[in-house]
Image: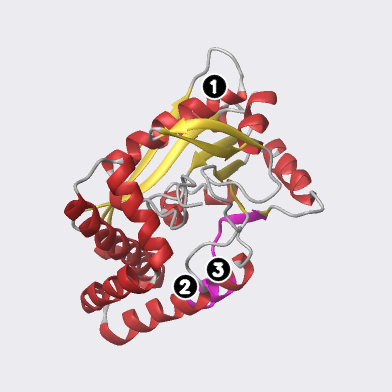
Amino acid sequence: MANWKGQSRGTVVGLRIYVFIIKTFGLYVSYFVLLFVALYFVFFAFNSTKSVYYLFRKRLGYSSFKAAFSVYKSYFTFGKIQLDRIAIASGLKHKYSFEFDGIHHIENLLEQKKGGILLTAHIGNFNLAKHFFDDKNNHQIVNLVVTDLEHEEIKNYLDSVTGKSAIKLIVLKDDLSHIFEMNKALQNNELLVFAADRYIENAKTFTHNFMGEAVRFPQGPFKLAARNKIPVLFVHIMREKNFHYHFYARPYNPEKNDAKILLKAYLENLETMLKKYPHQWYNYYDYWNDFS
């Protein structure tokens, strides 16, 4: 995996555009406008387009034409979930339906009184987690562990538009103060959520085969869970047809606590999700380090 810089595509400027579109045109017209916005990115976000094309052509084995069209569909779907995120938080939640597939695993996990780790990835729309956990009245025990350098700016802007989120953030910092926060959360029987498919510069990594190629992954979430015998779930929130979102939670039941075995299970689950929802994979950079 090429070195990710700790910053996601999705700046405050982009979010302002999404909010403007919804408020000016409404949700349905916003989707129509997005057709042209997605086309713009196909031609003018060259590095992203190249990396996404590689995913469809080389890793998923699509034909040249299908891979090219899938790049466009990926951008369109990414924009759509950003619009959904804002629309749902701005009072249009009634337009959407939500499916809780395996939510009982979270309840079972919390009954163990050890806290828990939820492993997700940059796929689907886990930013909607608040709304799933709100419905179950347990959003206050969820901590998103983030590395995004612009998290505060983006978070503050979204809070000003949609209202303050009840889900807490733990930011990875150079002074390692996040370790204290994570330990405290686990002691309080809370949940830590990691998008464990990326690493940042100077992070310790494991290398493992993913979609047919060797890729590096951060050691931290997997070692934390294995060494401390913390219960783990694999979780994803995926968009489906007709304004429907599907929440997946799958338990990890190891024969022994080993970080590399956990990573292997995580990647098997992630490959299944990527193949089922190929247009909802949002790592818009040289993920497989194929271009250097």
Q: CA distance from mark 3 to mark 1?
A: 38 Å
- Identify the image quadrant of residue 47: bottom left
Q: Tag 1: residue type?
A: Ile
- Identify the image quadrant of residue 39: bottom left
Which element carries disc 2, helix, strand or loop?
Answer: helix
Which element carries disc 1, helix, strand or loop?
Answer: helix
The answer to which of marks 2 and 1 sits earlier in the sequence is 2
Q: CA distance from mark 2 to mark 1?
A: 40 Å
Q: Tag 3: residue type?
A: Lys
The answer to which of marks 3 and 1 sits earlier in the sequence is 3
Residue drawn 33% across and 82% down?
21
| Residue 126 placement (x, y as % from top left) | 44, 52
Label 2 environment density (alpha carbons within 10 Å; few <14, some 14–19, many ≥20): some
Residue drawn 54% across and 42% down?
196
Residue drawn 52% across and 51% down?
139
Q: Residue furthest top?
A: 255
Q: Residue furthest right?
A: 175
| Residue 93 placement (x, y as % from top left) | 32, 64
Q: CA distance from mark 3 to mark 2?
A: 7 Å
Which residue is under mark 2?
Answer: 162
Which residue is under mark 3?
Answer: 164
Q: Is residue 162 magenta?
A: yes
- Identify the image quadrant of residue 88: bottom left
